[in-house]
Amino acid sequence: MLHDPHAPNPAPHSGAAGMRLERNAHGRLVLTLGDGTRFESVVPVRAFPLGAPEDGLSLVAADGKEALWIPHMADLDPQARQLIEQDLAVREFVPTIERILKVSSFSTPSTWDLLTDRGPTQMVLKAEEDIRKLSGRSKLLIAGQDGVQFKVPNTAALDKHSRKLLERFL
């Protein structure tokens, strides 16, 4: 039974029991629930992508309504989890800063040369307010001028030079 995107969505289903997830010929995710209801082109959306990325995941149908709520990613079978994580990796492109090589100025705007988990890059910090402190001063989310978000999971894990440069902006 294929879900009609024009019909009103019943209350969303909850939990991963009995669900099946696969890719269609176009590379989009297709969700089949335990009762046989099928949703084409579902999109995974984390409820708390920074604070609790493993908890609270919604599979949103093509009509924008929730088709399935998954309380914990650990509840998914390995194949479904892998498919969801592949989609999330594309959707949630947030490079991790491993080193701050240099900054052009200690006032903003400032161009930063970075080494990230995706390779070397440059970022322009428009204002100090673009550095969000997520957990005290140790976990940061930094917005570049071009809209790319960079994360620092733990400032204490950065090398001494990187911490010294970063401290000037905190």
Image (spheres, rainbow, N blue to C red):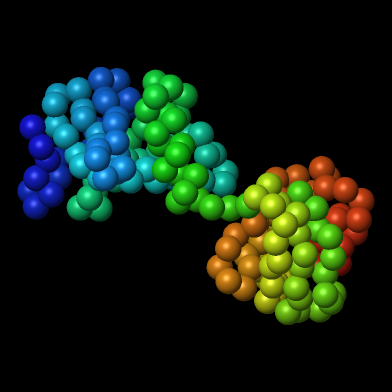
Can you tell which quarter of the image residue 52 is in?
A: top right
Query: Residue 138: x, y in percent?
Result: 76, 48
Residue under the image location 7 percent in, 48 percent down? 7
Above/below status of 111 relative to 91: below
Above/below status of 34 relative to 141: above
Can you tell which quarter of the image residue 130 is in?
A: bottom right
For this view, does 88 lie left or right of residue 14?
A: right
Screen quadrant of the N terminus:
top left
The answer to whether any part of residue 110 appears in the image is: yes
Residue under the image location 76 percent in, 67 percent down? 112
Screen quadrant of the C terminus:
bottom right
Near-viewer residue (116 or 66): 116
For this view, does 131 lie left or right of residue 87?
A: right
Above/below status of 115 relative to 10: below
Query: Residue 4: x, y in percent?
Result: 9, 45
For this view, does 42 lie left or right of residue 96?
A: left
Query: Residue 19: x, y in percent?
Result: 26, 25
Q: Residue furthest front?
A: 25
Near-viewer residue (24 or 56): 24
Residue under the image location 46 percent in, 37 percent down? 85
Above/below status of 81 relative to 118: above
